[in-house]
Amino acid sequence: MTIHFGPAGWSYTDWAGIVYPKPRPRGFSELAFLSHYFDVIEINTTFYHPIGSDMSKGWIRKVAAGDFRFTAKLWQRFTHDAEPFGAEDIRAYREGIEPLIHHRQLAAVLVQFAWSFSESKENRGRLERIREAFKDLPLVVELRHISWNTPEVMKFLKERRLGFCNIDQPESRGAISNTSYVTSPVGYVRFHGRNRTAWFNSKSTVAEKCDYLYSLEELKPWVDRIKGMEKEAEDVFVIGNNQFQGKGMVNVLQLKSLMTGKLVEAPGTLIEHYSKELAGFASNPARQPELFKNL
């Protein structure tokens, strides 16, 4: 398949005993474990600060297969700071992800903006500066404000080979949602959940904002959207960012099963916790106990 499914991040305390076994076997690696069930994971760490190259080299060694890929969020210095970024910022970010580029395991860099980043000449200029700074990398832009949802903007993105991140987020009058645009070789979909109360509450934690489990009725319209994207893109990445207690993982597994018409492999602990939701969609492979010996 040219459609890849995976979670956003992999290190969450609320995943213990739900996604990961509890207690964990000696030498257990979260990333190595997940790479047996998914072929892509979105890196959150790179949004908050640049990482060292040794860190990304370690990630490469841990994943199970050579065709496993990462998507990495761009450092918020580029997307959220009012002060213009400089050459040192570019160098610091790029240095950390260089091993992923070298090993051809970087599928995309996610350029994530806040909802307040609306369409304007100034903000288009920022997009162009980011494109110029990382002109050799597959960039995908997450634009949450509805002012960007125009044919002119899609043309602007296509001309600059900037991918568009299609999102499912809580509904509001000014929010983009449920699009299926492809503006570069990389198609991208992110599920944030629809927890509207927490999403628009400035006092809510990230975990509270992402605490949402989609119903099958809510997911099914995405099957045709993603299939349509597959016809236009070289690869499509479907990421569950509604990550509280592994709920995003449940939803991307359900989507994968719906799209392939087959049972998909999933961690036994996840199937046990979400037995109702994953019944008929996921199986617990007999080889799972053997996995722990190799982690």
Image (cartoon, grey):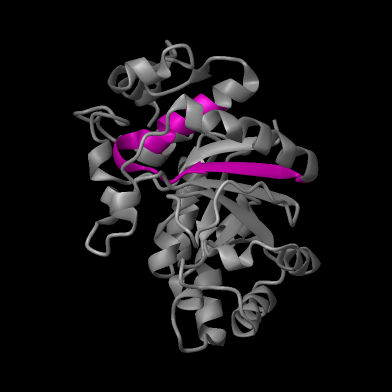
Residue 238, image x and y in percent?
57, 41
Q: Nearer the viewer, residue 44 or 154?
A: 154
Q: Is residue 73 above or below residue 13?
A: below
Q: Is residue 138 something that shows in the picture?
A: no
| Quadrant housing the N terminus | top right
**Residue at left 45%, top 51%?**
171
Residue for point 27% across, 29% down: 18
- Up the image or down, 103 lies above or below 265; here it is below
Residue 162 placement: quadrant: bottom right
Farthest front residue in view: 173
Q: Is residue 220 left or right of residue 284?
A: right
Q: Quadrant of the C terminus?
A: top left
- For residue 234: magenta? yes
Asked if residue 24 lies in the magenta stretch, the reply is no
Closest to the observer: 249 or 193? 193
Q: Residue at x 79, y 44 (%)?
A: 232
Q: Residue at x 31, y 43 (%)?
A: 211
Residue 230: give x, y in percent of width and height: 73, 38
When asked about the image quadrant of residue 259, the answer is top right
Residue 293 placement, left or right of 114 = left
Question: In the image, residue 89 lies at what x, y percent?
Answer: 50, 81
Which portion, as a residue range, is magenta?
233-255
- The image shows a total of numbered marks equal to 0
Q: Quadrant of residue 81?
A: bottom left
**Residue 10, relative to residue 247: is it above or below?**
below
**Can residue 241 be spotted in the picture?**
yes
Q: In the visual, does 222 lie left or right of 265?
A: right
Q: Nearer the viewer, residue 33 or 265?
A: 265
Residue 9: give x, y in percent of width and height: 41, 48
